[in-house]
Image (spheres, rainbow, N blue to C red):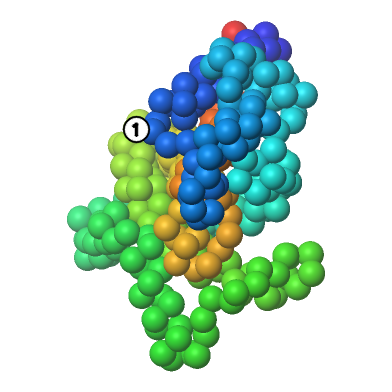
Amino acid sequence: MQRYVAGRLLLMIPTLLGVAILTFLIMRVVPGDVVALRYSQAGAVSQDVIDRERRLLGLDKPIQDQFFDWMGQVVRLDFGQSLWTDRPVTEEIAARFGITLELAILAAIIASAIAIPLGVLAAVRQDSWVDYVIRVVSIGGLALPSFWLGILMILGLVVFFRWAPPLIFVPIWKDPVENLGQLIWPALSVGYRYSAVATRMTRSSVLEVLREDYVRTARAKGLRELWVVVRHALRNSLLPVTTVISLEFAFLFGGLVVTEQVFNVNGLGKLLVDAVAHRDYPLIQALVLIFSFVFVVVNFVVDLLYGVLDPRIRYA
């Protein structure tokens, strides 16, 4: 087990290094100059001023020197300064990381709370009216974009309850009730969208397990149907469901751009869009690297959870 964990941790290094190289090269290939963009509102600016600013930002160096300088900073957990705001990149990310993390956790909890019970119920009541209703609900979640559903939720809240998304975010440690009131609605719109995939996966997995011989044996012994479903069917069908929910949780870190915009949530997704619009190379590179790190870590944790959920799995 220790050897497997060590091997997986070492594999993270080339993965993240490859992401860093690709991101760095793509940002240099994309047309646009952050210096010219900064001075675009100032009217005519001489080429000497632009060249001096590029020299101060280190953009006049060869591309390989810029990459090695940046990687040296990353190793020290220093992502440099934003080319647009002149603030440290770590401060820009830290100010929004908690918001995105809390929203992703709430959305994952809501998606799990919806998907697992409905998926099990649809499998147990296969081809009944309950199964058809749940399948329609799950297909609706796949068909409806989360941001469009969020717009409908805001319109309903404004019309019926006179509530609109607040302009100022309140941290959870200052006012938990106000914080939950701000994030529950975007979490609901996103959680319903991602619960649709997990619901269908849960239904398929439970149906497959219910056809196994040990489930029929448990029923033949007179075990109650509730215990058959919960202790035998559900537990042995959680592996693919856990994978789907975990990957969706990792995706939420960078995939909530439009939803954050609709609900006025200033998270990492919105920060990435602003950074791309401003050609803020250090900030974009740091955000993409963080998103990739989250994906890698979530995959690693899920692999370890497999051994907990299914004792038959052993890592050698």
Question: Which image quarter holds the N terminus?
Answer: top right
102 or 37, which is in the foreground?
37
What percent of the width, then of the height, locates residue 156? 40, 83
Quarter-of-image position of residue 11: top right
Question: Which image quarter holds the C terminus?
Answer: top right
63 or 295, which is in the foreground?
63
Quarter-of-image position of residue 267: bottom right
- Give me the residue at 32% from left, 37% from top: 208
- Give me the residue at 42% from left, 58% from top: 258
Quarter-of-image position of residue 74: top right
Visible residue check, residue 227: no
How many labels sit on residues? 1
What percent of the width, then of the height, locates residue 125? 29, 57
Q: Is residue 207 left or right of residue 310?
A: left
What percent of the width, then of the height, locates residue 205? 36, 39
Q: Amino acid at mark 1?
A: Glu
- Give me the residue at 56% from left, 63% from top: 265
220 or 152, which is in the foreground?
152
What percent of the width, then of the height, locates residue 116? 45, 52
Q: Is residue 231 above or below residue 78?
A: below
Q: SS class of the residue under badge 1?
A: loop
211 or 172, which is in the foreground?
172
Q: Is residue 235 left or right of residue 9?
A: left
Visible residue check, residue 169: yes
The residue where tag 1 is placed is 212
- Give me the residue at 42% from left, 36% from top: 32
